[in-house]
Image (cartoon, grey):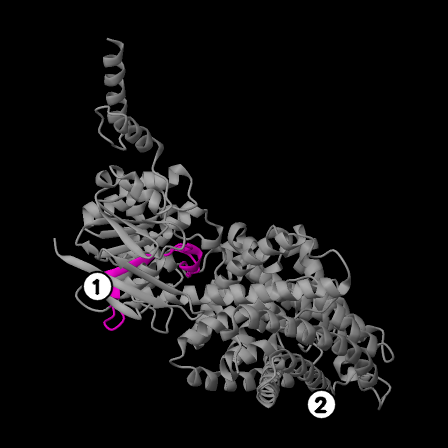
Amino acid sequence: MSEIVKVNCISHRYPDATEVSICGLSFVIHEGERVAILGANGSGKTTMLLHIVGILQPTEGEVTVFGDSPTKSPLHDKVAMVFQNVDEQIIGPTVWDDIAFSPLNYGHKPGEVKNMVDEIIKEIGIQHLASRVPHYLSGGEKKKVAIAGAVVTHPKLLILDEALTGLDPKSKVEIIKLLNRFNKEHNIAIAITTHEVDLVPRIADTVYVISNGAIIFRGTPVELFQQPEVLRKANLEPPPLIELLKALKDEGLQVEVSDDPAKAKKQILTLCKAKNR
Amino acid sequence: MSAIYLIDHYANNLSSYMHKASTLSKLISAALALGITMFTGSALALMIDFLLILMFMRTAKLPIFRMLRWTIYPAFFASLFALSQLPYSFILPIITMFKAVNAALIMLFLVSTTPYPELFSVISISSQTIGNVAFLTYRFFFIFIDQASKRFTAMKAKGGLVGGWRKRIENLANFLGLIFVISFEISENVYSAMKTRGYSGKIFCHRKKERKFSKNDLMPVAFALCFSTLMVVSLFIREGGILI
Amino acid sequence: MHIHVPDGVLPVWLWILGYIIVSTFLSVAVKKVRGDEKRGIYAAAMSAVMLVAMSIPLGVPYHINLTVLAGIILGPWWALISNFVTNVMLATFGHGGITIVGLNTMVTWFESLVGLYIFMTLQAAFKQRKWRFTVATGVSTFTALMLSAVLVIGIVAASGINPAEAIHHEHEGNEESQISMAVFTVLLVPIALVGAVIEAIITSFIVMYVRKVRPILISG
């Protein structure tokens, strides 16, 4: 799988003189990969994403997206982003108009745009929202509209900044299923920032953990859960199940630390039966 | 709650023949009704027009008392003019008041049955730049009013409107300053989001609406006809020498 | 301030002229602002802020305009576009004045321009003082609003409204049947004065707040 994004030790100085640096391990996204970026509030996750889409330029360090610097060479429709506050992203008078915004601005003809928008609306299952006015939608509906607006041009990389924050559990599951489907069916690479650790195995192949301006971990979710101290270092809490299994392992019991409840149940039942004999 | 918020709700979420009529027929009938209101010199015709507007509003399921409350502003300023005309006539102040209120009601009727973006698409025909500003203003208004109302509630809960008038003015001004700063930060974020979506100075906001005339357009036509009929009748009556 | 002359009072030729003049200036503005799309977003934000500010009930038939602030933030041409959009929207939701949107836009733009010019002059004159932005805002807002009130009175006087002609009926030849400008002025001036003071104070406070929190938004 080829590399589409590489971020090497960047620094950025905001207008109010706040300096944000992200060094440590280098950050890489491969074609078709699902990446989760974990970190506490203020760790620099959003800053890094804004560098990847070319909104911010690093004062130090290097960012390459599809082989070029995103600030020097426009990404056009190769990269799309869903922002943390979707109200700031949905600007069309209706849902349909908003989803049509990108393809129209990228020069697609009106007939083509109609097909693209109708197709994505159907794929995401928001046909009933097409003529609705955005400010009357619920949070989950707005997220779906924002995602539709981002993927309508079939980008190679979709970046989501805290896309699951503020959603009820049902909406979270729906959004995760949607993203996984786009990844599988359209080979869209996904990069998502979150601090909901328990959702990471469902949404990511690779996890990065950022703490105090450094990327301190790069690996699979399974590898991450074997080292819950990494999460604690980043001011994140490991899922309770992981804590339990890790504690049992530290006591010398033969368990595998995993976030799979079924697997965990089987292991604990085995241990209990062994104890009872 | 803000008038725009409610007007937008009525325009988008209510359903009546007027709501289902085409934008063009509603614009034409409103323009006609407005023009007739401006040119009519008959107090009686204007009073009947006033009742007609309220009647049509009722058929469009609009809350007429709230609509009337919203015309207090033009009515107040019309009363200033009416007062300055009183030394010369008793009829003229009535005409002044009803022209002002009727014109405001006609506009309210139009925008409460036609979503703002459909009206702005008319502005976009003459200038994409101005149309873009209008579309974005509409969208920003709802984002900002949401931010403003939450923070206003928080300010009230913290006692921001309790105390002397000086403190209240200071708190209100600081509140406006906060809304101002938040608004501009939001607009910067919106600009960033638009850039990532390919924005290059133009917004294409094509309303996906059918622009065919249908039987629903009979309602705005009826509206305009009533006004026209009254004007013609008032002219004849005047010609006949009866002053109204 | 807005010309709160009700629809139907000013002669047709005057409000049509207002529309023609504002259309001319708008077509210039659209050319001048080409390429500055970021400020266009600010213009929309400013229009929305003005509408939000006007939605705040003060308990009196006066609303905060923020037209001078619009001039300071946006510059002359975007301020015109922003004022026009605001006036169009205001006229549609019960504020009245749909026929005089053209004239109203010219008056509010006049405020923005005068306010901007006085602000720039004063804050440059007191370059070393910490309070220069606040004082410049207060003085420019008050002055701009009072001058625009004079402009409104002038427009109404120049319109030459004759109530006898407005009635279209036979009259006894009352040669002095002009609208009572004295009464109109006496009624309008105190309202304009109180409004200018309120707006100057509030706008100054806003600028003080913004300078503390985001000084880059309002800088010399």
Q: Are marks 2 and 1 on the same chain?
A: no
Magenta span includes B121: no
Is the residue marked by circle 1 packed among few (<14), some (14-19), or many (20+) residues within 10 Å? many
B92, B229: nearer the viewer? B92
Q: Quadrant of the N terminus of chain B?
A: bottom right
| Residue A162 visible in the snapshot | yes
Give the residue drawn at x 49%, y 75%. Answer: C216
User: In x, y percent, where is residue C174?
Assistant: 85, 88
Which element is circle 1 on? strand
Identified by mark 2, the residue type is: Ala
Give the residue drawn at x 41%, y 61%. Answer: A92
Q: Can you tell which quarter of the image residue B95 is in? A: bottom right
User: In x, y percent, where is residue A105?
Assistant: 31, 68
* Letter of the chain that mark 2 sits on in the rendering: C
Which element is circle 2 on? helix
- Region in magenta: A70-95
| Residue A133 visible in the snapshot | no
| Residue B80 relative to residue C75: left or right | right
A250, C186: nearer the viewer? A250
Q: Which residue in the structure is indicated by mark 1?
A: A65
User: In x, y percent, where is residue A111?
Assistant: 27, 62
- The correct choice, above or below, for C156 with respect to B200 in the image is below
| Residue B231 relative to residue B190: left or right | right
Q: Which residue in the structure is indicated by mark 2?
A: C158
Identified by mark 1, the residue type is: Val
| Residue B87 relative to residue A177: left or right | right
